[in-house]
Image (spheres, helix red, strand yellow):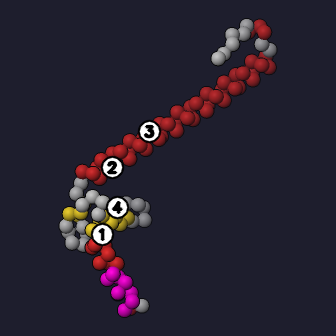
Amino acid sequence: MFKKIAVEQVSQDEQVKAKEKIDSMMHKLQTLKNKSLELRQKCENLKNTLSEDEGKVLTCSKCGGAIEPGQEVVIKDSTGTKTRYYHKECFQDLIRALSTFLFLNG
């Protein structure tokens, strides 16, 4: 991949260019390493979050019953934090009640 060249054969200009190229490549390599570490950390955090979510039983904020996985409606606040959980049916009931309220008062 690399040729061995006697140092005497390479001009000063070529040596500077080669050094700049090496420095540039080293900087790119370090940037990629940093991105790789960031992605690895994000994956680890996501993995931990998912394993925490799997372990807890969700409770419906309307009826108080346990919610089966895949049957939940999640309400989040403006920061993305999960604040309430509902059964799909309970949530539909709330939406119907809200629609009726708005229709009668609007």
Residue located beneath label 4 in the image:
82
Q: Residue at x 78, y 9 (%)?
A: 9
Q: CA distance from mark 3 to mark 2?
A: 15 Å
**Dot 2 corresponds to which residue?**
50
Q: Main secondary structure of the magenta part?
A: helix
Mark 4: few, some, or many residues within 10 Å (few <14, many ≥20)? few
- Which mark is first along the chain, 2 or 1? 2
Point out the tag, 4 or 1, that comes first from the N-terminus. 4
Going by the numbered disc 2, the residue's amino acid type is Leu
What's the residue at 61%, 27% (across, down)? 26
Instruction: Calculate the distance from the C-alpha at mark 3 to the C-alpha at mark 1.
Output: 35 Å
Q: Secondary structure at mark 3?
A: helix
Q: Secondary structure at mark 4?
A: strand
Mark 3 vs 1, N-terminal side: 3
Distance between the Cα atoms at labels 4 and 2? 13 Å
Q: Residue furthest left?
A: 65
Q: Height in image: 26 above or below 54?
A: above
For disc 3, the marked residue is 40
Please give the label number shown on residue 88.
1
| Sequence-first disc among 3 and 2 | 3
Boundaries of the magenta span: 96-104
Residue at image point 47% right, 40% down: 38
